[in-house]
Amino acid sequence: MAKSNMSDFSPSAELVCILRAKSYNEKREGYKTDDYISLLISHSLTSFISMTQKSFLMQDNTLSPQIPVGSYEFLISRIKYIDEFFQQHAGSFAKIFILGAGFDSRAIRFQNLLQQSLIYELDHPASQKNKIAKLQELSIYPQANLQYIPIDFNQGDLANTLQGLPITKGEKYLFLLEGLIMYLPPSTVEHIFSAISNYAPTGSEIIFDYVYSHVLSGENTSYDSIEIVEVLKNIGEHWLSGIEKKQLNTFLNTYHLTLLHDVDAHALEQRFFTNQQGKVLVKLNSALAIAHAIK
């Protein structure tokens, strides 16, 4: 998650944690996720924004008016997409890098599947310190194969950080950039993908979500796109980078990556919010999509 100007507080990271917690308790078809760690952490979030959101989000099916239409459902789909991939494939990667980890809990929730993998969580030093403290309050401590690496992506050198980690012939790595690149300026996004491309062995994979460029430029006038941009501004965070809707392949090829899956809102609706009768239960926010690529 992006880091705000405050010393140890990211509004978007806390909001995502609370939404994850809400989804864990969901009874509605398609909404249930398995992130019980976020539920535990959410109880200790005491910022004004978090307390305001919890007053809405922990009650039945109520959503705060500040939650843009379809964005909660996109978040749930993103969780499920990545969780399913972890369950099926994460153990085959020698190293897993979670960039902008925020309150991500997969290193804990999937530890039985990741015993042969090294997991690295990279995040802003203050945000990472805050997360570790909250986990310690819950008596949750990192496994031996989990390493926290503090880094400010806008100032730190990811390339040097990665190059300091040894590579063994035949290994392949997984890079997870969930809810990250849209909060970073284009130059930082370029540096991140260049660093990953130069470091990752052939066969490594990357999963990230992204915003369409036309949403940021204001060319997309759909209600859900306009609303989500405005809501982020209201909590002090901004989307800074996007990818043109039909230029994802071009973007990836620049970094010697090959697209495996480009999953837009419609595809996510079909996959995660369609009932047994084939009816789509809800519409997702159309400003975002998920990309999955391989080197």
Image: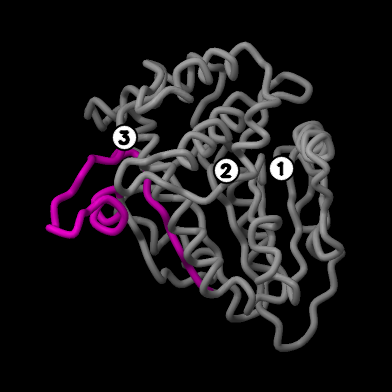
Q: Position of residue 266 (x, y in %)?
A: 24, 51
Q: CA distance from mark 3 to mark 2?
A: 19 Å
The residue to which callout 2 is attached is: 180
The residue located at (35%, 56%) in the rendering is: 247
Please state which of residues 251 and 115 is positioned toward the viewer in this rendering. 115
Q: Quadrant of residue 73?
A: top left
Quadrant, the N terminus: top right
Dot 2: few (<14), some (14–19), or many (≥20) neighbours within 10 Å?
Answer: many
Look at the picture and state if 182 lies above or below 161: above
* Location of residue 249 in the rendering, given as x and y in whole percent from the top left corner: 39, 64
Disc 3 and disc 2 in contact, CB within 8 angstroms: no
Q: Residue at x 23, y 40 (%)?
A: 283
Question: x and y percent of residue 81 in the render?
Answer: 44, 58
> In screen coordinates, is 218 left or right of 98?
left
Q: Identify the amino acid type marked 2.
A: Leu
Whichever of labels 3 and 2 marks the residue nearer the N terminus, that label is 3
Read off the magenta span.
Answer: 265-294
Dividing the picture into quadrants, the one containing residue 123 is: top right
What residue sits right under mark 3 in the picture? 70
Please check the rendered image and state whether residue 120 is part of the magenta-colored stretch, yes or no.
Answer: no
The label number, if any, that marks residue 153 in the structure image: 1
Indicate which label's residue lies in the foreground, 3 or 1. Answer: 3
Identify the mark nearer the N-term, 3 or 1.
Answer: 3
Report the amino acid beneath label 3.
Gly
